[in-house]
């Protein structure tokens, strides 16, 4: 039997600030773990790029984190999870956690736990997914959900302007609210039972989305789902826990000041003293 | 004396589709010139990136176009013009035309031609500039205008969400109009005499901006200004004209289909048959 602790850090990455919503959840749920976060801010957004490009970027970022000696990788970016995960799993030896499977399991779990009532009459259960162009057109959520719950109706929608709204901090203007409403119109006209926020930037808009869609739709936040999934990996001994947090370090590929500003606006509780710029 | 014609193409580039507004103007005004356009779509947007990164990208793109044998370069991207032009001029031997000086000259020309009346009373003449974060914080417009017309009041404003609105084709929704209005609020509260659209994406929003700001403000479009500047370079024999258009070729660094779609939405008159993906 291997030693029951592994004090190496956990690597976590996103194209920009979005993955910080996942990091924040992990910091809270795993107070004894050390984390290294990388935001690929020189190449954000991933959501509009081609699959081949996203794959190349994902592997470059993972290689950087592996060189820092991480014991596991959290791909806290839906586009990178949707398009880069198979290539990444073929490429590296540490356990890798994406955001798509956890999100799907959390959505399905809502029905199975009884948290969501069975729809009235014969209407099938319905799960919606919102994400970037790249995530939605990859079909990764629809495929994963079809395997888990083939009898459910799955509806996908890309909301490409939500990432710029968050990255620019333009979330409290009336135009932001109207833009979110217009983007979600298909889910206002025909509500879904559960809606997966299939982009790690979207939890920052969660209160507004919840307000617009109302109580008929339960929102599923990848950040919480990933924390549950990491807990399962630890329970199964696939990732061994650490016993004391040593540090949290942030890397970006460009413009550290801007990254710090955007992060501070949305996640002021994160301590951003150590942000270093690296060239991948 | 050198031969009076030069049939080599003119290179023109932008981070994405924005520069096509400049290309369209040049195609119309210079029917005998051949053009090669490059959209750096793998790395769009430039406007949020650091000066060092924008400089590196600008030089990489220019080197690619120089290898295609261009006789001159049009930097149809305000961020690249603001941050990359001095490095680029030190780096290559063909004439280079940015968008900032032509835009400033066109704005100042409005007053000097008498196209704009002298303000009532003692109020100084006032020129506004809108652009990306990168362009505005570089101060390139403010510096250039201060040299040309030190007695004018210059007011700058970054409108970072206009590029995503255009790139996503989200321009005809009520939220887009509201977002443009909210962004321009300082120029609604205190109008400027002339407003330079300091980003090549913005001419696509020109009718809406004109409608919101009203007749008190005259808009200055870089595309038209660049065509005038190229005409001056030809008049001075710095760039020799061609006598017949041979081709127009498009290169992108990622996702040709998406580039073609976005371009077709805004500039349907451009023939996008030849779009090739290159890796810089």
Image: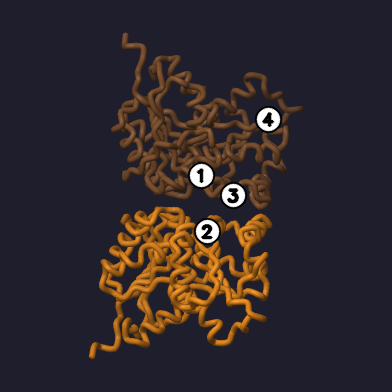
Chain colours: A orange, B brown
Question: Which residue, given by chain and number where applicable, does mark 2 sit on?
Answer: A163
A95 relative position to A177: left or right:
left
Question: Which residue, given by chain and number where applicable, does mark 1 sit on?
Answer: B262
Task: Tell me which numbered mark, 1 or 3, is placed earlier along the sequence.
Answer: 3
Q: CA distance from mark 4 to mark 1?
A: 41 Å
Which subunit holds the residue at mark 4?
Answer: B
Is there one chain holding both mark 2 and mark 4? no
Quadrant placement of the C terminus of chain A: bottom left
Q: Residues within 10 Å of mark 4 (few under 14, many from 20)?
A: few
Q: Secondary structure at mark 1?
A: helix
Q: Secondary structure at mark 4?
A: loop
Q: CA distance from mark 1 to mark 2?
A: 18 Å
Residue B182, which numbered label? none
Q: CA distance from mark 2 to mark 4?
A: 40 Å
Q: CA distance from mark 1 to mark 3?
A: 11 Å
Q: Tell me, yes or no, whether the two marked residues, 2 and 3, touch with CB atoms within 8 Å.
A: no
Is there one chain holding both mark 2 and mark 3? no
Is residue A27 visible in the rendered structure shown here? no
Question: Which residue, given by chain and number where applicable, does mark 3 sit on?
Answer: B170
Q: CA distance from mark 2 to mark 3?
A: 14 Å
């Amino acid at each position: 039997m291997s030693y029951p602790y592994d004090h190496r850090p956990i690597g976590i990455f996103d194209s920009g600030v979005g993955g910080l919503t996942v990091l924040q959840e992990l910091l809270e749920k795993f107070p004894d773990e050390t984390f290294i976060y990388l935001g690929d801010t020189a190449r954000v957004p991933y959501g509009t790029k081609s699959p081949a490009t996203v794959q190349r970027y994902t592997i470059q970022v993972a290689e950087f984190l592996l060189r820092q000696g991480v014991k596991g990788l959290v791909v806290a970016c839906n586009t990178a999870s949707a398009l880069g995960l198979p290539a990444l799993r073929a490429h590296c030896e540490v356990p890798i956690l994406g955001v798509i499977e956890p999100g799907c399991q959390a959505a399905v779990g809502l029905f199975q736990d009884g948290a969501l009532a069975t729809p009235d009459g014969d209407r099938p259960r319905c799960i919606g997914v919102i994400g970037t162009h790249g995530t939605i057109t990859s079909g990764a959520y629809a495929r994963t959900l079809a395997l888990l719950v083939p009898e459910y109706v799955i509806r996908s929608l890309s909301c490409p302007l939500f990432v710029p709204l968050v990255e620019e901090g333009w979330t409290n203007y009336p135009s932001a609210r109207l833009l979110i409403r217009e983007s979600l119109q298909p889910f206002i006209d025909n509500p879904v039972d559960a809606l997966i926020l299939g982009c790690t930037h979207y939890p920052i808009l969660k209160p507004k989305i919840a307000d617009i869609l109302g109580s008929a739709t339960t929102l599923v936040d990848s950040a919480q789902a990933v924390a549950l999934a990491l807990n399962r990996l630890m329970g199964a001994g696939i990732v061994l826990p650490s016993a004391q947090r040593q540090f949290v370090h942030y890397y970006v590929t460009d413009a550290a000041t801007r990254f710090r500003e955007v992060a501070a606006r949305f996640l002021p509780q994160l301590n951003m003293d150590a942000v270093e710029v690296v060239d991948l």
